[in-house]
Amino acid sequence: MGKNREDNFWSKCAYGLADIYGGGAFVVISTFFTVFLTKALGMSPALAGTIPLIGKVWDAVTDPVMGNIVDRTSSKFGAKRFYILIGSIVSSVTFLMLWMNTGITDTLGQYIFYAAMYILFSTGFTIVMVPYNGLLPDMVDDYSKRGSFSGIRMVFSSLGAIMAGLVPTIIITDNTNAGLYFTVAMIFSAVFLVVILLTFFGTWEKRKEPVRVPLRKSFVQSFTVYKSFSFKLFICIFLAGQGAADFVTGLAVYYVDDVLNAYSGGRFTIMMGVLLLSQFSGTIIFSIIAPRTSKKFPILLGFPVRILATVALLFFSYEGAPFVMILVCSFIIGLGMAGASVSIYAILSDMADVDELITSISRPATVSGMATFIRKIATGLSSTVIGICLALIGYDETIAAQKMRQSAAVQSGIAQLYIWLPVALMLLTIVFAKLFPMNKAEYDVIKKEIKRRRGEDNSEITSEEIAVCEKVTGFKYDKLWNKENALSF
């Protein structure tokens, strides 16, 4: 029965559905929340911009702690599914509260309310996504099957991003009308509740003993996951690969509006639609390719092509440039972005096994929590870097507020940032992916050695397998399977 459900397409869909929430929630927030605060509620842009930063600081505490709480929980549903069930309600309610118009006119009161709502939403997101990111290792053992599950998940993540990127633009016809934002919030709150519950009911989780290390020591011990050589390289792939996407989405409005002077007439919506649809298509393509090749292959194939398309924008980064060529380049860029997402989340599902061989403790939620934590910090930093870079090239917000064009030098600077920042990060991602030491053959050795250590396999380890264990973990063979490796950093 267990083997049948691992091969069942609907099981893969059930697992992936929750990432409509994971892939869509922050697209809505990053695109519209600041606009909601400033245009609909009249909050100062300087104040509004600090609210997400408060959320990231809060995440620095909650993500590692949540991972440890999950690994220490015992439930008849399975610890991770138990918190996914709780999180389905919390995340839906807190997302809705984030867009309430309370009628508060006092600036301080308004700021405190929405900062508190953002913190509550971030907590709800953590309750769902930390256990969700750690669920797959406790569902499926097979390397290729995990890749297939991750691929389907990325399809739903892309679908969530498309919905979140396009549906609000249809409904919010007047960006000063707070009620329209709340209408969008009600729609997505209902969607998020349904998809997370479908994942809860359609997944399973192997029973295991909860981690017995005291929770009071959990924060320091969360960082011991970084002792793994593979996990360190994975984090580098994660940050560089996703950072390359952050700079595209973060600079897209400036590029289309200030460089191309093509924001009006719905052309920005068209460009974002092409980018998102190509990501969706690419996710499907790479999800089929990855299980037949390696989990690194979507990056190694997609990023070189994406680099060429990004550099090609140099020839079309001016007012009056043929917009169809911008769309062609954007489509190819979206395909490359999909390759990175497929690779990253497929690799993440294997990091808990490497950590277990090092520590003798199965703690996939802790590993997931630390990856989620680093990713959120990086997202916050990318916004800061974009702001600093725009200031350095002389971007004038007064001119922007008057709906006037920036100087030719600033336009050129924006184009250079839009092109070369992602290219630099993509090149780094390719290097890190090349260095990453684990494909299917290495994964199989790691899983076999874990079975030996548990007493489930009586075979003798070979010198070649010892070399693989040491290469993947970064530890000498005789230092593996030691609980002390998890207790102190």
Image (cartoon, rainbow, N blue to C red):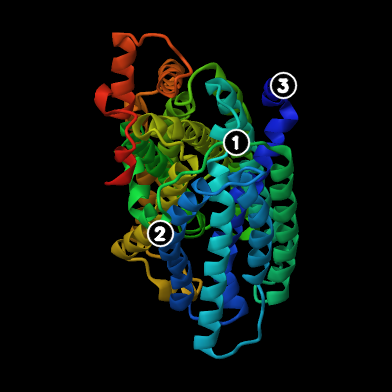
- Which of disc 2 and disc 1 is earlier in sequence? 2
The location of residue 23, given as percent across then percent down, is 59, 48
Q: Is mark 3 on a helix, strand or loop?
A: helix
Gap between marks 2 and 3 measured at Cα: 39 Å
Residues packed near mark 3 inside 10 Å, few (<14), some (14 to 19) or many (20 plus): few
Image x and y of residue 219, in percent: 37, 55
**What distance separates the C-alpha of mark 1 from that of mark 3?**
18 Å
What amino acid type is highlighted by mark number 3? Asn
Determine contact: label 1, label 3, CB under 8 Å: no
Q: Which residue is drawn at 61% across and 87% down?
A: 104
In front of the other: label 1 or label 3? 1
Marks 1 and 3, the one that precedes in the sequence: 3
Q: Residue at the location (71% across, 60% down)?
A: 189
Q: Give the Cα separation between the discs numbered 1 and 2.
A: 29 Å
Q: Which residue corresponds to mark 3?
A: 4
* Badge 2 element: helix
Mark 2 residue crowding within 10 angstroms, few (<14) / some (14–19) / many (20+): some
**Residue type indicated by callout 1:** Arg
- Residue sitting farthest toward the bottom: 106
Provide the residue designation for mark 2: 60
Res. 207 mark: 1
Q: Is residue 150 above or below residue 288?
A: below
Residue 5: % across, % down:
71, 26
What amino acid type should be assigned to the residue bearing mark 2?
A: Ala
Say if 190 sits above or below 291 in the image. below
